[in-house]
Each structure stands twice: as C-alpha cells, then as structure tokens.
Image (cartoon, rainbow, N blue to C red):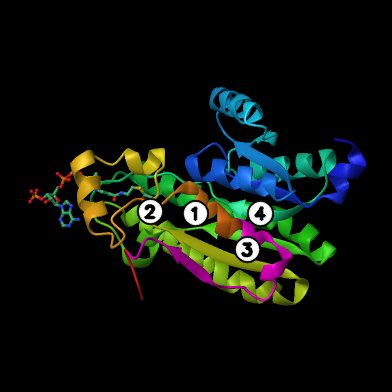
C-alpha cells in the first residue's frame, strides 16, 4: 500500500488485537476499508496470528506495545503516526482476567487487571487525543463487560476496571463532544473466546444456563457494533454504553 493510500484511509488501532474479540474487530474493520493497526504484546503469538490472518486475506499492520506502560504506548502511537498517519479510530480492547474471591486476591492480581483493563484506556487516549482534536474527527470505543455493569463472584478487580471504563467514557465524551470525536462503551456478555472458555466448565455451564438466550455470544456480534460505532453514521451517539449479552443483564 502506497503512502498516499495509507494517508487517505482512516487508521484504526485495536489494542489486544490477537484475542478473540480483537481478531473479529480487526477483520470487520478491514472489510469496512479501514487501515487497521493491530497492537500486540507477545511476538510469537502475534507472528502466528498475522500469518493465519494473511491466509484468510486479512492484512493488518502489526505494532508491538505493552498497554500497561504509559511511555511504551506513547512510543507506539508515535511510530504509527510516522509510518502511516494519526489514529482516527481507537478501540480499547486489551483485557485480562485474574479471577479469584477477594479473600484470596493478591496485590499483583488486582494491579495487573486495573493496569491492563483500565489504565491502558487512559494511556492510549492520552496519546491519540490531540491528533483527533486537530483533525476534528475521532472514534473511541471502550470494550467493557456485562460484569462491569452487574458484578460477578470472583471478579472484584475486573468489575472495578470495567465499570471504571464506562465512567471514563462518560466524562471523556463530554470533554470532546464539540471536537467531532465520539466516545462509547460496549459491554459484551459471555462471548465464545479463550477468556470465557478458561472458566471452569461446570462454572461456565451454570452461567450459560442463566443467559436467557441460552448460548454464548459470537465474536462477530461484537465486531458488527464496533463497525457501526466507528462509522460516520454513528456521529450523534456519544457517552453511551451498549450491552450485548443475550439478555443476561437487562436494566
Ligand atoms: N455466588 C455465590 N457463591 C459462589 C459463587 C457465586 N456466583 N461462585 C462460587 N461461590 C462460592 C462457592 O459455592 C464456594 O463456597 P463454599 O466454599 O462455601 O463451598 C466458594 O464460593 C468457592 O467457590 P469455588 O470453588 O468456585 O472457588 P475457586 O477459588 O475454585 O474459584 C473462581 C473461584 C475462580 C472465581 C470461580 O468461581 C470462577 O471461575 N467463577 C467465574 C468467574 C467468571 O465468571 N469469570 C468470567 C471470566 S470471562 C470474562 O470476564 C469476560 C467477560 O467480560 C464476561
């Protein structure tokens, strides 16, 4: 792709791209015609992921960066800008779990989850926002969780981070509303990803029994909403939180 072609396209950065949700988002955004930059942390996983996607006809630019480091994110965003141009669409998708009841939770399990799932959103936004303001256009989509809305046994760390993410969305949406930038949250329920499949089978089955639709969600079901919120058609939607959870939590 020539430099001009790259410049003419809207650049979408997806953090934690090599996970189940990230993969579906990257593929959908490529289908939509974005220039997609896939953020990753682990070289080997990323190389395998990139190869597999190329075989399927999906070509993302790959960028390494630990989203728990303010400085590393800054470096990553600068390198994207130099190589391709400023980020127009940011999907804060990177997330981890360290599930355990509070009486067993270690400090590192709390900190890792808050850093990866919540602080990362500030770090990424802080480094892309000035270019979005200068351009007068931006789309920020924060991937939260049903468990940030309703709580979940074993997830005080995760629920706190995911609920915090939506608070961040609301304030940020107000601050940048006049700048052509929208900021929204998506709160997926239990989606068929490695993260959900890592929950012990009998525990997971009990959770699925409580989902009115009686099934896990598909990654593409989240990606379609990302695609809509990233588009120009969603211009009047900001500060919103979209639940996609099969009816598991209605309010
Ligand atoms: N409500 C009330 N009590 C519960 C409970 C619940 N939902 N779940 C477990 N307990 C109780 C158990 O009955 C047990 O009580 P007793 O000791 O009196 O028998 C006690 O808590 C310990 O339960 P476990 O044996 O399950 O404890 P554990 O330490 O082996 O496992 C856990 C704890 C890892 C948190 C496990 O319960 C678990 O995996 N829970 C599911 C967590 C979950 O849903 N994670 C989502 C991951 S995917 C994701 O996060 C994506 C997304 O956004 C949706």
Mark closest to the chain's N terminus, 2 or 1: 2
- Residue matched to label 1: 221
Mark 3 vs mark 2: in front: 3
Query: Residue 229 location in percent, x, y?
Result: 63, 63
User: Is residue 50 found inside the magenta-colored segment of the image?
Assistant: no
Q: Could you tell me which residue is drawn at 82 percent across and 42 percent down?
A: 84
Q: How far apart in space, not on screen, are marks 2 and 1 (Cα)?
A: 22 Å
Name the foreground residue: 10 vs 44. 10
User: Nearest the camera: 177 or 229?
Assistant: 229
Counting the numbered discs, the total is 4
Q: Is mark 2 within 8 Å of ligand 1?
A: yes
- 173 versus 194 height, above or below: below
Residue numbers of the magenta segment: 227-247
Q: Which residue is mark 3?
A: 229
What residue is at 81 percent from the left and 45 percent from the top? 81
- Front tag of 2 and 1: 1
For ligand 1, tell me if the residue under mark 1 lies within 8 Å.
no
Find numbered disc 3 in the image and state the secondary structure of the residue it sits on: helix
Whether tag 3 and tag 4 are in contact, CB under 8 A, the answer is no
Mark 3–mark 4 Cα distance, whole angstroms, equals: 11 Å
Mark 3 or 4, which is nearer the eye?
Answer: 3
Q: CA distance from mark 3 to mark 2?
A: 24 Å
Q: Which residue, given by chain and number where applicable, does mark 2 sit on?
A: 158
Looking at the image, residue 212 lies above or below residue 104: below
- Residue at 42% across / 48% down in the picture? 113
Camera-side mark, 3 or 1: 1
């Amino acid at each position: 792709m020539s430099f001009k072609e790259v410049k003419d396209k809207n650049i979408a950065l997806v953090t934690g791209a090599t996970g189940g949700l990230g993969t579906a988002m990257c593929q959908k955004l490529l289908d939509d015609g974005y220039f997609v930059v896939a953020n990753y942390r682990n070289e080997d996983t990323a190389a395998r992921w990139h190869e597999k996607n190329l075989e399927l006809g999906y070509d993302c630019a790959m960028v390494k960066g630990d989203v728990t480091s303010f400085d590393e994110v800054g470096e990553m965003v600068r390198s994207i800008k130099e190589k391709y141009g400023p980020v127009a669409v940011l999907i804060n998708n990177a997330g981890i779990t360290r599930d355990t009841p509070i009486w067993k939770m270690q400090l590192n399990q709390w900190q890792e989850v808050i850093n990866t799932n919540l602080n990362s959103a500030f770090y990424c936004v802080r480094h892309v926002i000035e270019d979005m303001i200068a351009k007068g256009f931006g789309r920020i989509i924060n991937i939260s969780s049903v468990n940030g809305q309703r709580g979940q046994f074993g997830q005080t760390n995760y629920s706190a981070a995911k609920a915090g993410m939506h608070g961040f969305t609301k304030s940020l949406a107000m601050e940048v509303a006049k700048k052509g930038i929208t900021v929204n949250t998506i709160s997926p329920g239990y989606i068929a990803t490695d993260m959900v499949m890592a929950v012990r089978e009998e525990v997971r089955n009990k959770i699925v029994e409580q989902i009115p639709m009686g099934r896990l969600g598909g990654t593409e079901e989240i990606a379609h909403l990302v695609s809509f919120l990233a588009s120009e058609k969603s211009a009047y939607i900001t500060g919103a939180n979209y639940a996609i959870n099969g009816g598991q939590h209605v309010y």
